[in-house]
Amino acid sequence: MTFSIARKEFQDTWRDGRFRWAAAIVLLLLGVSFLLARQQVEHQRNEREDATKMERDNWLNQGQKNAHAAAHYGVYVFKPVAPLSVFDRGLQPFVGNTVYLEAHRQNQAAFLPAQDATSMRRFGDLTAAACLQLLLPLLIILLAFGTLAGERESGTLRQVLSLGVRPASLVFGKALGLGGALALLLLPAAAGGAYALSGISGMDAAGEESALRLCLMACAYLLYLGAILVICITVSALAPTSRSALSILLVFWAANAVLAPRLASDLAQWSHPTPKMADLDADLLEARKQALNSHNPNSEAMKEFIEKNRDASGKLPANFRALLMQESERQTNLVYEKHFGGIWDLMEDQDKVVTWAGLAAPLLGLRSASVALAGTDFTHHRHFSIAAEKHRREFIRMLNNSHGASGRELWEKLPPFRYQPPSLSQAVSTAMPGLIILCLWLAGGCAALYVASRRLKPS
Amino acid sequence: MLETANLTKRFNDHAAVNNLTLKIGAGEIFALLGPNGAGKTTTINLLLGFLTPDSGEARVDGSNVASDPIAARRKIAYIPEQVMLYPRFTGIENLDYFSSLGGRKRSRAELLELLVGAGLAEESAIRRVSTYSKGMRQKVGIALALATEAKALLLDEPTSGLDPAASHEFSQLLRKLADDGVAVLMATHDLFRAREDSTRIGILRDGELAGNYTAEELKNVDLEQLYLEHLAADPALSEGKTESQK
C-alpha cells in the first residue's frame, strides 16, 4: 500500500507544472553554479601552479647572498585548491591562500579572494551547495505544504482514509513519492557535479579520496533534504489548512536559512570571544619584545643568552651565531604558537558552537559537515597554516645551519613546499558532529511524522 | 451488515446522534432522511470511524468501528456528496489508485470494465478527471464500490446537484449493488429518490431516529407529509417550516 501511495505521489508531483518549472530553475542554477565553479577552480589551480613555479625560480635564482639574508628574502607558498570547492567553497573566499615564509616571523595566509570581490558578494555566492542548502528546501516546501493539508481541503484525504488506509502508510508513502520526485531532480545535478569534478586537472591524484568525500557529502545532503521533507509533510498533516502549512514552513525556512546562521555566529562569539586584531597585534609585539631577537644585541634576553653560552674561559662557541639564530627562532616560534594557537583554538571552539547549534536548525549541521568534507573549513585551513609554518621552520633551520654556505647549491637543498591535505578520516572526524545532527533531525522528523499520522484528521 | 447500537455522539452539550440503533442487512437500501443538522453526516462519520462515539457502538460486518476502524473501513465504500478525485489523473488512474488502497489491485481492462459498467463512457475513463462533471465523478465512486467489493456502501447526499437523468442512472447502479448483496446507507434530502430506491426509510430528528419504515409500509403513504409531520414534532423545526412556507 505504501508503494502504491508513493507511486501515485511521484506521478502526481511529476505532472504538476509548478514542480517542473521550479525543478528546471533549480537545475539551471545548479548547472550554472557547477560551470562557474569549475572555471574558477581551474583558473585558481593554474594561477597557483604558475605562481609556485615562478616563486621556485625566483628562489633558486636569487643569486649569491648570506644564508640569513636569504631567510629574510623568504619564499611564498600557495594553498592548493580543494577539488571539492567546486561544490562548496566554504571559508575559502574569506581566508588567505598565500603564506609568506620568512625568518623570525610566522605570517598568516594573505590575499583573501573576498577582498577582490564586488559589493554583490554580500548577497552570497552562487554555489551548488547554496542551491542545495537554500533553494531546494524552498522547492520541497512548495511541493509538500499541500500534500496532506491540501488533500484535506479538497476532500480526497477523506476518500483515501475511508478505504482503510493506515495513516502511517499514507504519510510515509507520500514522503517516499515526493522523495522519489526529488531524487529524479538530484540525479542530473549529481551528474553535473561529477562532470564538473572530472574536468578539473590534478583531480587524478586525489581522485579516489575526493570521490569518497563526495559520496559522504551526498549522504549529508540526503539526510538534510530528507529531514526537510518529513518536516514539511508533518506540518502539512497537522496544519488546519494548506495556507497555514505554507506560512509555518516559510517561517521555518527563514529561521533555518537566514536567522539561525546569524544567531549561531553571535552565540559563538559571545561564548568564545576572539580578541580584536589590533589587540592581538599589540600583544604579539609585546611578547616578541620579551623573546630573544638575534637582531637586537642590547636586549636583556640577548645578554642572558650570551652569558649562558660562555665557556669557563669566557669565550663563546664557534657556531654561536647559528645557535643564537636558532634559539631566537625557537623563542619566537613559542610566542606565535601561543598567540595563533590560542586564536585558532578559539575559532575551532566557535565552529563547534555553530555546529551544535544545528540541533536547533539543521542547516548549521549540514554546513559544518559539507565544508569539512569539501576541505574548505577552518580545520583544513589551520592544517595548511601549520604545514606552511612547519616548512618555514625547516627552511630557517636549514639556512641557520648552513655553516656559511650560500648560493644556488644551498638554495636547491631547500625542498619545495608540498602540501598534503588532511586525510579522509580526519575530514570525517571533523564532519561527524554535523552528520550526527543531521541523523538526529531525520530521525526526529520521522518520529514527528509518525505521531502526526496518528493524529491525522480527514476534515 | 451495518449495525449501530445505542450510538451516541455529543459535541459539547449538543447530542448530534442520540441513542441511535440501526440494522441494515445485506441487499438493503436504507435511506436516512432528515433536515440539516439532524445527525445524518455524523452517523456516517461514526460508521467510518472518523468520529469516536461517546457511547454505544457501530459495527460493519461484525467489525467494531471504534476498536478496529481499519478493518471496518476495508468493508465499506463511501461516496460523499461530491466524489473527490485527483485532477491530474484520468478516471481509470484514479480508480486504479483508490482500488489498490482498498486492497484490490486490478488490471487495466478490469478497471475499464468497471467504469463502463458504472456508466462512464470509455473515452471519458481515459481523460483527466479535472474535466469531469459531478455525475461522472459519482460514477467513478460507484465503480470504486464495485472494484473494492465493498460489503457496505455509505452515501452522503449522493444525488444532490445531479440532473434527473444522472440521478436516475445513479439509482439504477445503486439497486444493482444492493442486488449483489451490498448493504447501503444513504443519507439524503431527496424524498423522491428515497422512496424510489430504498427498501427502508428512517427519519432522523435531533440525532434520534424519529421514524423507521419499510418500503411496504410506505406504499400508500404520502412520504412528504409523513416527513413534515415528523419534523413538526420539533417546535423549532416546525416554526422553521412555517416561516419557509410563508
Image (cartoon, coloured by chain):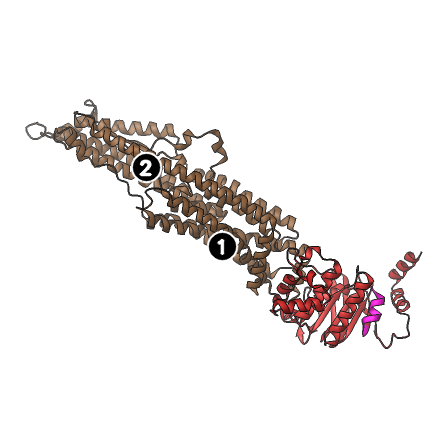
Chain colours: A brown, B red
Which residues are the magenta region?
B190-200
Q: Quadrant of residue B4?
A: bottom right
**In the visual, does B35 lie left or right of A207?**
right
Identify the mark at residue A442; answer none if there is no mark. 1
State whether residue A187 is above or below residue A157. Answer: above
Say which residue appears at 40% left-offset and 38% top-offset: A39
Q: Earlier in the sequence, mark 2 or mark 1?
A: 2
How many other residues sit within 10 Å of disc 2, few (<14), some (14-19) or many (≥20)? many
How far across and how far down the image is residue A459, in percent?
68, 58
Q: Of A285 and A137, which appears nearest the observer?
A: A137
How far across and how far down the image is residue A106, in percent?
28, 32
Disc 1, SS: helix
Q: Quadrant of residue B174?
A: bottom right
Query: Extreme top residue here?
Result: A298
**In the visual, does B188 lie left or right of A197?**
right
Which amino acid type corresponds to the residue marked 2 in the rendered image? Lys
Q: Chain of mark 2?
A: A
Q: Of A249 and A39, which appears nearest the observer?
A: A39
How far across and how far down the image is residue A57, in percent?
23, 30
How far across and how far down the image is residue A411, in percent?
18, 31
